[in-house]
Amino acid sequence: MLKRKVVNLREVNLIPDVSTALSWIEANSQSLTGIRRGVEREALRINENGSLAKTLHPESLGSALTHQWITTDFAEAQLELITPVDDDIAHMLELLRDIHRYVLRNLGDERLQPMSMPYFIDDAQPIKVAQYGISNLGRMKTLYRKGLKNRYSGLMQLIAGVHYNFSLPLAFWQAYVGITDEVSGKEEISAGYLRLIRNYYRFGWIIPYLFGASPGICPSFLKARTTALPFKKAPSGLVYLPYATSLRLSELGYTNQSQRQLGLTFNHLEEYVFNLKKAIKMPCADYQRIGLKQNGRYLQMNTNVLQIENELYTPIRPKRVLHLDESPSDALMRGGIEYVEVRSLDINPFSPVGIDEEQARFLDLFLIWCVLAEAPEMNAKELHFTRINWNRVILEGRKPGLMLGVNLGSKEELLSTLGKSLFKDLRHLGVILDRNNTNTHYQEVCDKLVSGFDEPEHTLSARFLDQLIEHGISGIGIILANNYRQMLRDEPLQVLSDSRLEDERIQSWKRQSILEAEDQMSFDEFLETQNRR
């Protein structure tokens, strides 16, 4: 068990001192064997010309309500492809690729949009929210999405991303904090993941810096919005910021200003859950103006700040697998934090499946570092301060000489200096993980990515901006979508099989039918019970 030296972040020059923790990890490297991961990739279905598909979710893909690996997100045309939990990065990504191969063989002439920000969106085209059948659960999922559309607009909801789910093995927690098992040690494990989350808020700007891939947007995102951002316009119509990394994470992307009042912090699980539940009961004047019903039809689940807990927009979430009809917060209180969901990744346009092995290995290293580094408790003021750093990186991360705040803004330091300082620790971690795996994969990732701090043109946003300016947002989108469609349709399955995929399709429809047959109450009654939770 490691006796950690308490380090106050405000007394540290640049980043927390993790030398003691790294020495411990080096002596206990096997405790990191069995890291568990999963990926959720969102993607719009589009036509050959890049326009949004008007077709319903294909029946040949199974039930979007109950399929293990293939569902929908906000819209009928917005797929979400999900891998099972896996302790091997290469296997996980190959399985994700198999799901893509299968999907594209069942989409006819449609393609998958290869980037986060939508293009070719016709203002007059109605965006059909996802449909999940006639069960109360399915109807509620559709109503929730209808509420999102009425609250934030359908266009915002079409923005896509990649979520990376991550958890450390029980052996790590047993050795690191001295617990016996997951049940009796749930408080210590939860405290460790909350430490990870606080460090993620403080230093997670490094993710959009390295992997942001939405430096430009379709002009439709500026319609009916006022912004003081100094946008440039390319001859192709692309609107962009020269040094931006991820406009998806900006005020023009997937945000919710009304949630800023919640003051959620990540110091104690009970406090986090209490404030989250309070938000679900907190009336919101803006949403009350929308109304609950119109002509007898629901417009949203309720008129509170959050309809359900999943409406909370954060760059990272504490999670636990749900039992039966538990809410996410009830699951957390029952068993503690089981894993974290990283939500700051743009779709990688240079990967056919939206994420690559380099990104996964970096996230492993960074999230482990976030657990090891001391993380003093945060108040609302510091949480706001971290948003300022994130926004700087999102809007002008590649700007020469960009400074980020350190120690609540009392000091500033070059982004490049902070990044390279952090990478010294990450590479040390990489050596340890590579020793476990008898290769040099993590070190190679560090050696490649660290160059992006002295040469920002190596970052994903810079490389993609060149393509966006040259071809236009729809032009490069169509080129990549066509290439990936042909590539993936032609490749044989590697992990899954046609028979297993077909069986899951059939079973998913059976599971949906069972849910629909088992309903014992009206939808109004069901919705009331959900709103009371």
Image (cartoon, grey):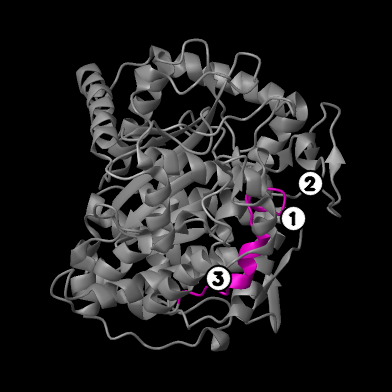
Q: Which residue is drawn at 69% across and 29% down?
A: 119
Q: Mark 3 points at which residue?
A: 202
Determine the secondary structure under disc 3.
helix
Determine the secondary structure under disc 2.
loop
The numbered mark at residue 396 is 1
The answer to whether residue 288 is above or below residue 37 is: below
The answer to whether residue 31 is above or below residue 146 is: below
Left or right: where 469 falls relative to 485: right
Q: Is residue 66 visible from the viewing direction of this image? A: yes
Q: Nearer the viewer, residue 296 or 161?
A: 296
Determine the secondary structure under disc 1.
helix
* Image position, residue 358 (x, y; %): 44, 44
**Callout 2: few (<14), some (14-19), or many (20+) C-alpha neighbours within 10 Å?**
many
Q: Which quadrant: the N terminus?
A: bottom left
Q: Which residue is drawn at 30% across and 57% down?
A: 326
Residue type, mark 2 in image? Leu
* Image position, residue 337 (x, y; %): 32, 66
Residue type, mark 1 in image? Glu
The magenta stretch spans which residues?
Answer: 248-266
Question: Between marks 3 and 2, how big is the CA–CA gap?
Answer: 24 Å
Q: Nearer the viewer, residue 186 or 415?
A: 186
Q: In which quarter of the image is residue 135?
A: top left
Residue 257 drawn in magenta? yes
